[in-house]
Amino acid sequence: MNKLFSSLLLMYTLSIVVCLSACGQGKNEPPPPPPPPAVVIFKTPDEWKKVLSADQYSVLREKETEKPFTGKLLYNKDKGVYKCAGCGNELFTDEMKFDSHCGWPSFDKEIAGGKIKKIEDNSLGMHRTEIVCAKCGGHLGHLFDDGPTATGMRYCVNSESLTFQKEMAVAEATKTKNNIDTITLGGGCYWCVEAVYEMLDGVKSVESGFSGGTVVNPTYREVCMGTTGHAEVVQIVYDNKKTSLDEILKVFFTVHDPTTLNRQGADEGEQYRSVILYRNNEQYKTAKSIVDELNKRKVYENPVVTQIVPFKVFYKAEDYHQDYYSQNQEKPYCKMVIQPKLEKFEKLFKDRLKKTGN
Ligand SMILES: [Zn+2]
């Protein structure tokens, strides 16, 4: 009874508060901003100790501050993404970092999307704004309004609170060294495409990942939701003396259906689109001439809808997506979807298979 009474009282009080605040506001005033997202990852101290180093734990979970000028990321100038060391939440990019000479990594902006929570901090006799990861609540550092750049902000962050993922620069990925070249292709589920190219003679490595979208360093789950703009792709490094882009693209057009827009079989969504991401004019010309030829000769019943777009950046997928077929051959998807594609490839390109031991 008591419980019921107190919740009724609470509802009554709330309705008065809502009414009062609504009455006090002009009708045209914008609604208040939504509350910051609640922490979504919760772990006990013991659970955190299992996944964090002692230094990370004392900074992230006990709000300690690392000694100035000691952090591993202080002078890092590589291109890439800074993530929360507790949960992997992407917080900053290299473009937001600047040298503040204060002894800790400093940023003038955060990646949009409410990834960082600001909390009033009156400890140590100072009035400061503490910044924490909105996903796991991990302590990052403090936010000051004395930044030297246009934003005027200085996110002063402990290196221990961060991990850094280096972005593979376009130039690095493009360089042709000793006839080694790279191409990025999307042909539906990357598990299938990767498995095929692993067998082609002249292919040195194949990685599954994401490209063509706008979200920095996406996760598989985010890409599956279809909101990142990325396609599932494979990045193929190959030896031009043993194979060629021409051959790689012939394989590509054999093992996927380039005529279905944003779909491969049962896999549907923009992330399954057929796409060739070229790195230079030569790759563009080769891709374009093959697509034109396929359409001219009406090789398929319907026109080829494969996109041919410039390559910008490749984000490697999580480890368990790499070599998926060879690790999971017994799974139904591998047997039913990937294996028939491999058999088709083996039949048509039987002279071009990797010799064992290659
Ligand atoms: Zn976090």
Image (cartoon, rainbow, N blue to C red):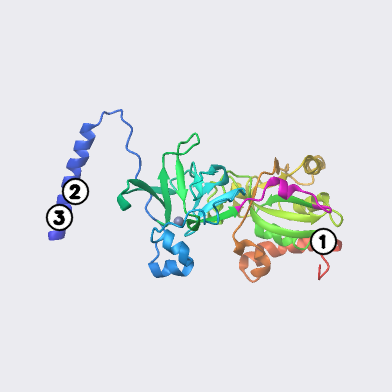
How many marks are shown on the rendered structure?
3
Residue stretch rendered in magenta on the structure:
166-180
Q: Secondary structure at mark 1?
A: loop
Using the numbered discs, state the Cα–Cα distance from disc 2 to disc 3 in whole angstroms: 9 Å
- Within 10 Å of disc 3 (Cα), the crowding (few <14, some 14-19, many 20+) is few
Quarter occupied by residue 202:
bottom right
Disc number placed over residue 6 in the picture, else none: 3
Residue 54 visible at all:
yes
* Amino acid type, residue under disc 2 in the picture: Met
Q: Which residue is mark 1?
A: 201
Towards the viewer: 339 or 61 = 61
Using the numbered discs, state the Cα–Cα distance from disc 3 to disc 1 in whole angstroms: 74 Å
Residue 178 part of the magenta-drawn span: yes
Q: Which residue is mark 2?
A: 11
Confirm or reject: label 1 Cβ below 8 Å from ligand 1.
no
Where does the image place residue 83, in percent across and percent down from the top left?
52, 53
